[in-house]
Image (cartoon, rainbow, N blue to C red):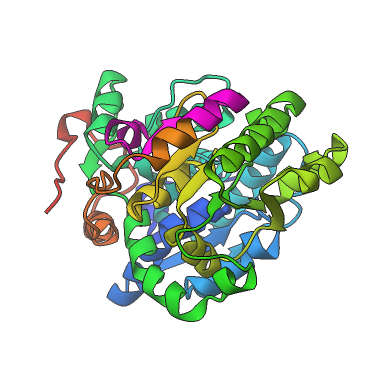
Amino acid sequence: MQREIKILTARDLKPEVAVIVGTRPGIVMLAPIIHELRNRGLQHFVIHTGQHYSPNMDGQFFADLQLPTPDFRLEGVAEKRTHGGQTAAMLEGIENILLERRPKLILVGGDANTNLAGALAARKLHIRVGHVEAGERSFDWRMPEEHNRVLIDHISDYLFITGENARRNLETESVKGRICMTGNPIVDASKQHYELAKLRSSAIRRFGLRPDGYALLTMHREENVDDEDRLRGGLQGVSLAAEHANIPVLFLAHPRTLKRLKEFRLEDWAKRLPHIRLAAAVGYLDFLALIGSARLVFTDSGGVQQEACIHHVPCVTLRDNTEWTETLDIGANRLSGCVPAVIAAATQQALSTGREWVVPFGDGGAARRIVDCVAADLAAGDGGSRTDPEERGALALR
């Protein structure tokens, strides 16, 4: 009779790493790591959970980032309507793949349901977990992303952090994994592909924009777009701010946002807002070209806050808090919530200040540092046991 397998032992695991992706920010963040694994010839495979389903939010990003087709892709996840249903489907799907391939380590990046499902599946099987972009906190327990961050950090063996704020958060929470200061691979991805974007993208011309003469808007967080009052207030505020600044705004609408605008019967209203042009989300090279030449960015996305900061473009964040508090400290970012008057005031402030801040996400090279740690783990003779807490904090930027 075949043995029922619920956990894997050290003897079962192979010197291989699984990389879990499923959302736009995760694909961008982990792309440099996938390239680094390939360049070094380290055994690895990629699982796409299917959390994002729009071609411009998914397939086009793989093409723009010159990534191979994922080795595995889960089906039916995007159709799940609840956090529990979506996470459960991904958890089961990832677990089945991990049982088949039996890697020694998995990597997840960020705070989406994809990453929680991957980390949980691996932890239950006694496979080590590496969390890229660990330790970030908004301290807003209403946000599903905040739940995910905290849970992933507390079940990870390696916590790859961007800066000292993340280290303080993790040490305060007494995480058990090893804290590794690496910087953020989103810097690698954004810088590496920006020059290519300037050469290949026609987005600025297609949208009839003038470099440094427009603002960019993205809005997709459920606490904003699933709340009719906040969605309406955010868009009214951006329109008011754009009118005061006499600047057009290109609104690259996430599929979730477009769906909510229709459900709330706000689609026609949004299209008539002064100074705002509504358009579908674009691929990564087009997005990079647009953000790099923008005068200002409005967003509720953590990844877009980062990329605006990397390219020295002022940002107004349509949230009451942010996990990227470093961007507030250096004057690259301002919080406005979805209150029109506050958005207008934050915009005026952002447009009147300098753009010469030092990027707080590392100097590039994060992918190399992370893969250094991965390679050492794969080469070690031990199995999937949990990292000893006494060994935390061994890796430093170099």
Residue 167 position within the rendered picture, expressed as x and y whole percent measured from the top left? 24, 31
Quick one: 243 or 184, which is closer to the camera?
A: 243
Seen in the picture, residue 250 relative to 173 is either above or below; the reply is: below
Q: Residue furthest left?
A: 398
Does the magenta-highlighted stretch encompass residue 326?
yes
Q: Quadrant of residue 22?
A: bottom right
Q: As drawn, is 85 to the left or to the right of 266?
A: left
Quick one: 341 or 119, which is closer to the camera?
A: 341
Q: Quadrant of residue 13?
A: bottom left
Does the magenta-highlighted stretch encompass residue 133?
no
Quick one: 80 or 328, which is closer to the camera?
A: 328
The residue lying at 58 percent from left, 29 percent from top is 144
The residue lying at 73 percent from left, 27 percent from top is 227
Query: Start and end of the magenta stretch?
Result: 324-345
Residue 143 position within the rendered picture, expressed as x and y whole percent measured from the top left? 56, 26
Quick one: 170 or 310, which is closer to the camera?
A: 310
Q: As drawn, is 304 to the left or to the right of 387?
A: right
The residue lying at 44 percent from left, 42 percent from top is 315
Q: Is residue 71 visible?
A: no
The residue lying at 85 percent from left, 34 percent from top is 264
Q: As drawn, is 8 to the left or to the right of 246?
A: left
| Image quadrant where one finds the C terminus | bottom left
Residue 273 position within the rendered picture, expressed as x and y whole percent measured from the top left? 74, 43
Q: As drawn, is 168 to the left or to the right of 187?
A: left
Q: Is residue 206 visible?
A: yes
